[in-house]
Amino acid sequence: MKISQKFRKYFLRFTISIFMGLICLIPSLLFSADITLIASLSGDKQTGKFNQPVSLFFDESKKRLYIADTGNNRLISFDSEFNYISEFDVGGKLKYPMSLVRNSREQFFVIGGPAKHEIFFIDIPQRDFRRLEIRDSPAGENPVVPGKLAIDKNDNLYITDRGNGRILVLNSKGRFLREIKVENRFADFSDMRVDMDGNVYSLSTLEGKVYIFNNKGELTLSFGKKGEGLQEFEFPVSIAVDKNGLIYVLDQHKGSILVFKKDGIFQSSFLKNGWNPGELNKPSYLYTDMENKIYIVDRGNNRIQVFQAGK
């Protein structure tokens, strides 16, 4: 029986499309296979159960993990093996911690307070707890509304200003150094990270876009768009960059992490929505350390999940 020329063409196109689909999946499958869940923290009898944790910070010098246990009005710390160390709430003064960093002098900066957007300076040994005022910052169209914090190797503080769609850079005393922004009123800069070279990786949730700036605050690259495709963002909420320059974006609605090379080329995605170990429910924050551990605040499940990526 002879096969028609039309059928041959159809069969060839179908075979090619299947092959190309499998090729596209290979990087994702390889990457996902190299991700291992190594810890899940949700509190216990000693610490009490977590209550709506929002963010975290890993101190590379001390190898300590600090979690903003927002609903319990406290910061709680663990060692690198995830053993509980201590908790502190500044004698009940700390309210609703939403974001935190720790500098080389072991001092904390925390966004929180009753209004959830004040910046506080905390020096535990010195028993110093006070509100940090941003000094000499240029006025925006709206009042400054701090959202997320990051810190660089020189202890300079980076603050997303949700009220004006920009990033403010301050020294450790709160004095303004510079601002980072783009001429786009839809850019909301919901999260950011700073690498060892001072490059700033920022995320705009409303646009579904990543912006990368050099250490002078100049825009060098932007990529990403909203959509339901494998490489697109539905509701991205947090960003991280690892020691190899891979960029991780946490998508809350997808319950997954999308991975890109530093030139914005999509690599893979992994994880999914759910309640089982290794699954996510309304995740809110993402962090990576120098040993390629991936920390995720799995807020809907009231836990922190830690994955080990390939080194």
Image (cartoon, helix red, strand yellow):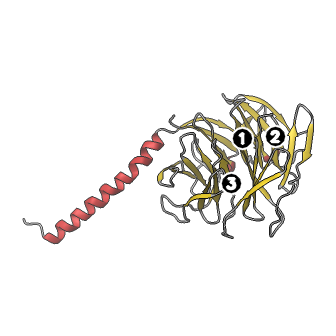
Relative placement, left or right, of 279 versus 43 is left
> Label 1 neighbourhood size at 10 Å, few (<14), some (14-19), many (20+)?
many
Q: Quadrant of residue 93?
A: top right
- Mark 1 touches mark 3? (CB < 8 Å): no
| Residue 230 x %, y % | 48, 58
284, above or below 42, in the image: below
Q: Earlier in the sequence, mark 3 or mark 2?
A: 2
- Residue type, label 2: Phe
27, above or below 127, in the image: below
- Residue type, label 3: Asp
Relative placement, left or right, of 165 versus 130 is left
Q: Earlier in the sequence, mark 1 or mark 2?
A: 1
The residue depicted at 80 percent of the width and 40 percent of the height is 75
> Label 3 neighbourhood size at 10 Å, few (<14), some (14-19), many (20+)?
many
Q: Quadrant of residue 38?
A: top right
Q: How far, Cα to Cα, is label 3 from label 2?
A: 18 Å
The residue where tag 3 is placed is 191
What numbered label is drawn on residue 196?
none
Q: Quadrant of residue 44?
A: top right
In this view of the protein, can residue 253 be seen by the observer?
Answer: no
The residue depicted at 65 percent of the width and 50 percent of the height is 215
| Residue 241 x %, y % | 59, 46
206, above or below 103, in the image: below
What numbered label is drawn on residue 57?
1
- Residue type, label 1: Phe
> Label 2 neighbourhood size at 10 Å, few (<14), some (14-19), many (20+)?
some
The residue where tag 2 is placed is 108
* Nearer the camera: disc 1 or disc 2: 2
